[in-house]
Image (tube, rainbow, N blue to C red):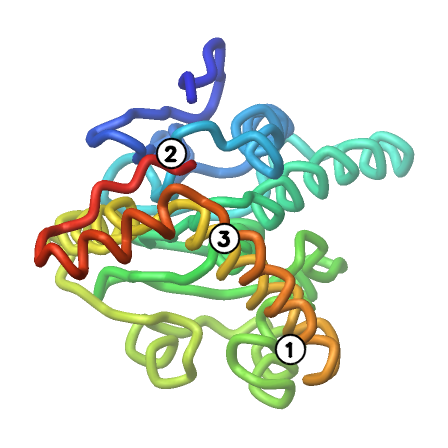
Amino acid sequence: MNIPENLNTLKVEAPEPHLWIVRFNRPEVLNALGTKTSQDMRTVFGPLAFTPGDLRCIILTGTGDRAFSAGGDLKERHGMTDDAWRLQHAIIEEGAYALLNCSVPVIAAVNGIAMGGGLELALCCDFIYAASTARFALPEVTRGIIPGAGGTQNLPRAVGERRAKELILTGKHFGAKEALEWGMVNEVCEPAELMPRVLEVACTICRNAPIAVRQAKKAIHHGLQTDITRGLMFEVQAYERQISTEDRHEGVRAFNEKRPPEFKGR
């Protein structure tokens, strides 16, 4: 998969085969999310819903050591007409949904502030690792709006309905320790250890069978949207997809030959 070109607000690099690091790249404004950011998110993640190529994992983080993303750029929005606001928010939705629908695993490495839309995009990822210095909030109600990039849906699924209502309806700030205790964050690291740890996890995922990983992600994601009976039916369909793959045969051969498997994504 080729790295997209002509991005304005995102920086994409490939430190290892099959792995991308995508960085919000506006450190001078704490990686605030403007219209161009959402357009770039749509450009990067949109094709990955169905055509991931040889890409196996993505890390989403922020440039610099102060912020993952401070959220929506309210300076850009100042003075917008209602119609302009609606049109811009449609682009924001498209960028967030492109991330949410990405077929390969996406790990958020929250390296600092993650507020408003920044936290919403972290919640669109499959799971979150955070620096001990990270700070979080969904403060939209203090600005006369509500979270509109998945926050009212993804946060309750991560921390439960009552906790999510408390956080969203008050707009209160919370830290990495609380986020870990509540189940929103998987692991907290010291700032210097965050990216090495996330890279370690991402590389582990990259070594696994990519079709199996994508199917497992799909089964979990869609199964949680329905009852257990339909979820089990979806799981079996996802399982069936792998039986005839070369990777399934390679995995069994490698086990019996007592060697690491070499998965090709076929």
Q: Which amino acid does label 3 sit on?
A: Gln
Q: Residues within 10 Å of mark 3 (few under 14, many from 20)?
A: some
Return the disc, 2 or 3, that comes first in the chain's sequence: 2
Q: Where's residue 176, x and y in %? A: 31, 71
At horizontal 37% and vertical 40% (from top left) the residue drawn is: 56
Q: Where is residue 142 in the image (x, y as percent from the top left)?
A: 66, 64
Mark 1 and mark 3 lie on one chain; the one further toward the N terminus is 1
Comparing labels 1 and 2, the label whose residue is closer to the camera? 1
Q: Quadrant of residue 140?
A: bottom right
User: Is 182 on the left or on the right of 255, as rendered?
Assistant: right
The residue tagged 3 is 242
Extreme residue in the bottom direction: 162
Q: Which residue is drawn at 39% across and 33% down?
A: 55
Q: Which quadrant would the N terminus be assigned to in this image? A: top left
Label 3: state its secondary structure. Answer: helix
- Residue 74 appears anywhere in the view: no
Mark 2 lies on a secondary structure that is strand
Of labels 2 and 3, the one closer to you = 3
In the image, taking residue 251 as reference, residue 60 lies left or right, namely right
Mark identifier at residue 232: 1
Picture layout, residue 60 above or below residue 108: above
Find the distance from the CA under tag 1 to the CA under tag 2. Answer: 33 Å
Give how far apart the Cα atoms at labels 1 and 3 are.
Answer: 16 Å
Q: How crowded is mark 2: few (under 14 residues within 10 Å), some or many (20 or more)?
A: many
Q: Mark 2 points at which residue?
A: 22
198, above or below 165, in the image: above
Q: Position of residue 17 (x, y in %)?
A: 24, 29
Do the CB atoms of the residues marked 1 and 2 lie less than 8 Å apart? no
Using a 10 Å C-alpha cutoff, classify the residue at mark 1 as few (fewer than 14 neighbours), some (14 to 19) or many (20 or more): some
Taking the view exactly as shown, the residue that stands out farthest to the right is 83
Query: Which one is nearer the viewer's eye here, 57 or 198?
Result: 57
**Residue 104 visible, this orientation:** yes
